[in-house]
């Protein structure tokens, strides 16, 4: 029995320390294979080429420039709470931002349009 902070901790008798032999067995096991189910979708979004004006405009309108969920909660003129941006929790966030950037670049470079309305 071990006494800490006025609380008694009782260790059961059947707990045995890990031996080197057991530790080696655990480390020799096959490494855990982790498959990323979203990687094929990420690759397809990254490989998507923007070569159509209508598609570029649609992508620029549909994907927001800033996270629409980030808010400050104000009561009687005082900031009470802040809701952080939730877009970073999206596993495809980087791909969507890259797609929007490519669409805007296409509109500026190839079509010569002003993209102020999309920002």
Image (cartoon, rainbow, N blue to C red):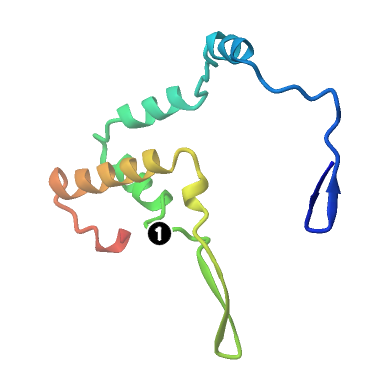
**The C terminus - image quarter:** bottom left
**In x, y percent, where is residue 3?**
81, 50
Asked if residue 27 is positioned above or below residue 6 in the image, the reply reads: above
**107 lies left or right of 77:** left
Which residue shows up at 64% across the image and 16% down it? 19
Q: Which residue is mark 1?
A: 66
Corner quadrant of residue 59: top left
Identify the residue at image location x=31%, y=42%. 98
Density class for disc 1 (Cα within 10 Å; few <14, some 14-19, many ≥20) is few
Please name whichever residue, 92 or 1, is drawn nearer the observer in this view of the structure.
1
Q: Quarter holding the N terminus?
A: top right
Which of these two is toward me, 54 or 118? 118
Give percent across and percent down for residue 21.
61, 9
Q: How many marks?
A: 1
Q: Is residue 31 left or right of residue 101?
A: right
Task: Pinpoint residue 38: horizontal percent, then vertical percent.
Answer: 49, 27
The local secondary structure at tag 1 comes to loop
Give 74 or 8, whichever is nearer the viewer. 8
Asked if residue 82 lies left or right of residue 98, the reply is right
Residue in view at x 26 percent, y 37 percent: 52
Q: Is residue 118 above or below residue 14?
A: below
The spot of residue 6 in percent (x, y) is 83, 58
């Amino acid at each position: 029995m071990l006494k800490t902070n006025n609380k008694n901790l009782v260790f059961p008798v059947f707990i045995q320390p890990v031996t080197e032999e057991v530790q080696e067995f655990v480390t020799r096991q096959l490494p855990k294979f982790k498959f990323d189910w979203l990687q094929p979708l990420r690759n397809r979004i990254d490989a998507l080429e923007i070569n159509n004006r209508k598609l570029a405009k649609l992508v620029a309108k549909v994907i927001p420039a800033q996270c629409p969920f980030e808010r400050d909660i104000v009561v009687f003129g005082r900031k009470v709470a802040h809701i952080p941006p939730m877009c970073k929790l999206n596993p495809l966030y980087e791909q969507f931002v890259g797609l929007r950037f490519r669409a805007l670049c296409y509109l500026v470079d190839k079509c010569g349009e002003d993209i102020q309305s999309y920002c």
